[in-house]
Image: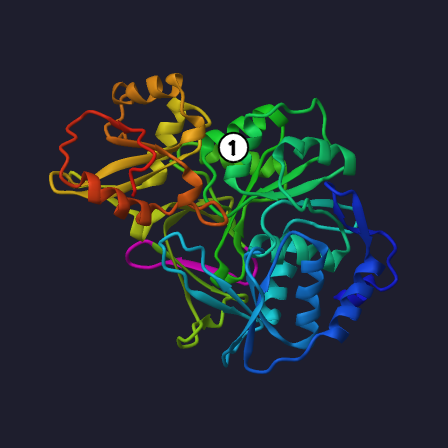
Amino acid sequence: MIEGHKNSHAPFVTDPISGVTVTGHEFYSMVKQTTQSLTRHEAKIIHLPVANTVDSMVLICAHALLGNTIQPEDPKKNEWIEECKVDADIVVGSSGSTASIKRICLRWEKILANVGAMKKHMAVNHNNVHMLLMPLKHVNSLFYSFLVSMVVKQHIVMPSKVRLISFWKWVDDYKVKSVNVSPTIVRALNIRPVPDCTSLTTVLSASSALRKQDHALFKNKTGIDIIQGYGLSEATNFSTVMPLDTELRTQVNQHFAEEPVMSIGTALPGQHIITDSDGQLEIRGDSNFEGYLGHDKANLVSTGDLGYYKMYEGKRYWFIHGRVKEIIKYRDQTLYPQSIEQFVQTHIGPNEFFCFGFQNIRDTEVIGMLLDKSHWSAETEKDIVLLPTRGYEYYPRLVIVADIDKYLTDTKKPKRILFGNIVKHKYQNTHFRNKILIDTNDDFDR
């Protein structure tokens, strides 16, 4: 794979902040030189700090060529070597949305199977310019944005620091055609000015569910219909993706317009998805992980996501409406935070928030909402107070205004369970009735 860049003098990676561009040949030379300076380690895991830099890309490739097992880490951490017998090429941490992080063992052979499936589905080629925005240590960026780009020799625009105020300028400067984003990035772009015309045509959203209103607003502002994909680190990366063809994708979304959530698409080749007796999605696929570190080998990925499929033109389109552990049992009703969020966003606009459940002695569980304090205003407060009048019974009874980043994972997934457990200690004896209580005390969790 790296050999394909040996004689390439075309741009491979550009940092738009520094303006530095590395060609394919230069990248190849850096990898070869770094490989010679490293040591082969048997029965060890190299904990490797990974930032959005060419140096990190080079180190990942060099260790792969040597056959070392690496675990990508936060760039602020120090590199260290763990004595550990492990049947894996790469070890990655799970998202940590439940505060319980497991270590996932992956093999290059299966990773490349997923890379090949995504390359074909997204019709990626060497004429494309792709922007890599999310952390390189995350599987979406590492296995899709980076490795797919390496395979087809497309140009990567990778800012060393994410400055979304410069997003459209970078797109224009480098004629970016595709980008991989998270719903948080979509919401941030939705509140910024958009150019009249752009080279950007393909936006793929992953890491967590994209809300319908965010999707619609982005399309109205830019004319670009976001593609939603789904996958877990345990399945290497993507397992389902919506169609690349814009016309077909529009037809699918219109056909399923009455569904409470957007479709995550159809299964990629080699990915076999079913639901168990509880409605939980299970994946058997060519790119499934070897198992969790210290546990037996796994053949099946139990996703923890509750979902279903609907047929369109002979294909199964999958939908996810919640997670098993995040279900809210409110007054004998089974509710999903994502459904409540769809309702809330309709009435409070593009604010950054998430909903959750917490134990309460009067109602079994109560619906809560964490709203980022940077979005708090008198207008937002007015919109929240009016939620009980909007014709939907399951609105949040408790709204906490705080720094939301403290309760998101690296890929911006809400830590609903962790936050609900924190909140219950203060509010488990409170009688909310049908009113909304707003807590703006910034030290509520201390």
**Residue at figure coordinates x 41%, y 38% from the top left:** 404
Q: Is residue 368 visible?
A: yes
Question: Which of the 4 image quarters holds residue 74?
Answer: bottom right
Question: Which of the 4 image quarters holds residue 301?
Answer: bottom left
Quadrant of the frame with the C terminus? top left
Name the spot of residue 327 as percent of width and height, x first: 28, 46
Q: Secondary structure at mark 1?
A: helix
The one of 9 and 221 positioned closer to us in this rendering: 9
Circle 1: residue type: Arg
Q: Is residue 199 visible?
A: no
Magenta range = 268-279
Query: Does residue 276 belong to the magenta stretch?
Result: yes
Q: How is the image coloured?
A: rainbow
The one of 109 and 263 positioned closer to us in this rendering: 109
Residue for badge 1: 187
The one of 208 and 26 positioned closer to us in this rendering: 26
Name the spot of residue 145 as percent of width and height, x first: 65, 52
Name the spot of residue 274 as percent of width and height, x first: 40, 58
Query: Does residue 253 belong to the magenta stretch?
Result: no
**Residue at figure coordinates x 49%, y 79% from the top left:** 84
**Residue at figure coordinates x 48%, y 39% from the top left:** 210
Quadrant of the frame with the N terminus? bottom right
Crowd band around label 1 with a 10 angstrom C-alpha radius: few (<14), some (14–19), many (20+): many
**Residue at figure coordinates x 39%, y 23% from the top left:** 348
Establish if 370 lies above or below 55: above
Establish if 203 lies above or below 43: above
Give the left or right position of residue 196, taking residue 250 as reference.
Answer: right
